[in-house]
Amino acid sequence: MSIGIAPDQNATENATDNTAAIVQPRRPRRRPASVEGERSIVSPLDRRDPRVRVTVSAIGGLLVVLLAVTCAGPLFWLLKAATSTSQETLAEPFSLWPSGIHWENFADVWIRVDFGTYFLNTIWIMAGCLFFGLLVATTGGYGLAVLKPKYAPIVSAAVLATLFIPGVISLVSLYLTVVNVPIFNVSLINTFWAVWLPSAASAINVLLMQRFFAAIPAEIFEAARIDGAGPFRVFFSMVLPMSKPILGVVSLLTLVGAYKEFLWPMLVLPNPKDQPISVVLPRLESTVDYGLFMAALFISVIVPVLLFLVFQRQFLSAAGNAGALKG
């Protein structure tokens, strides 16, 4: 008859504790917040030295000042020249308003040169290019990235191939098309349609939209289709509200491109009353006073700056999303 020997309870508990201690992984030691938050050439220990701290602050302030002068200096000088007389600007270019600030230069160039008409033409051209550009870019990107028909790869390759064709090569054929539009047999010369329609066919904008739409999870569209949403409902109720950052970027690129275009509006808008600012400015240089010309230049320069300030949140947001997608 065998007799079972009961194990020692204390020995069993000690063995269990040792095994748990061995199996349980050791937690990594967290670094101090000061070390994690600051990663630079100068360590937090070096910053405790007053001389190092003062030197770093001085260098940082100097860089900020140099950046501000480099970026805002030319714009400030243009404002100074626009509010000075021609003699003051030509004789003393860097003097600050010897005879006072002449704000009347802006009113004179707006009324005497009829600059308001050219500015209004520019606004109409930009508005039409924005509308048709977004229409083509959003629908084209949606069709290639979300609907994905069988011929989508061929269309994407064709759109990408147009980026390698210089615009000067297609200038003559495009002009002949605008002079006599096929099928309709009408001429678009001296109409804003001649600027709106060609600018809408932008391969860059279509590809930007296609990439952004392709990054949206496909499960969202599948869930919408299961709920009974059609392609138009998905496009207007889901895709467009989720695409505000890229819409801001494409809008900014389209507006700036339409604003600075010179050659094409000069060709298709020969009537001076229909021309935008970009075409009129070279003609004003030899026909008006130098001070008035500087005022017209300042008005034309400040518009892109205001556009960037309006769309800067969407632009930076889309840039951050692009960086996250690359990572």
Image: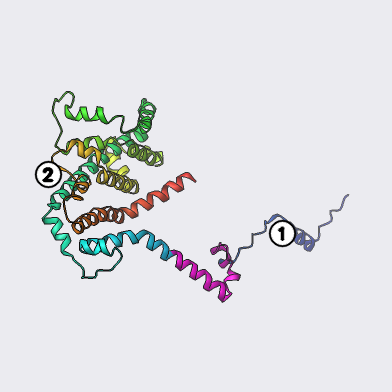
Sequence order check, earlier mark of 1 and 2: 1
Residue for badge 1: 21
Along the line of sight, the residue nearer the viewer: 272 or 214: 272
Direction from residue 148 to residue 99 in the image, left or right? left
Residue at image point 21% right, 68% down? 101
Foreground label between 1 and 2:
2
* Quadrant of the image occupied by residue 128: top left
Q: Position of residue 212 (x, y in %)?
A: 38, 42
Cα gap from disc 1 to disc 2, whole angstroms: 87 Å
Q: What segment carries the magenta color?
A: 34-63
Residue for badge 2: 273
Q: How many marks?
A: 2
Q: Residues within 10 Å of mark 1 (few under 14, many from 20)?
A: few
Type of the residue with mark 2: Lys
Could you tell me what secondary structure mostly forms the magenta stretch?
helix
Q: Is residue 158 above or below residue 84?
A: above
Along the line of sight, the residue nearer the viewer: 326 or 226: 326
Q: Residues within 10 Å of mark 2 (few under 14, many from 20)?
A: few
Disc 1 element: helix
Residue at image point 15% right, 49% down? 120
Q: Position of residue 98 (x, y in %)?
A: 24, 70
Direction from residue 211 to residue 109 in the image, left or right? left
* Quadrant of the image occupied by residue 266: top left
Q: Position of residue 121 (x, y in %)?
A: 16, 46
Disc 2 element: helix
Residue farthest bottom in this picture: 50
Q: Is residue 227 above or below residue 312?
A: above
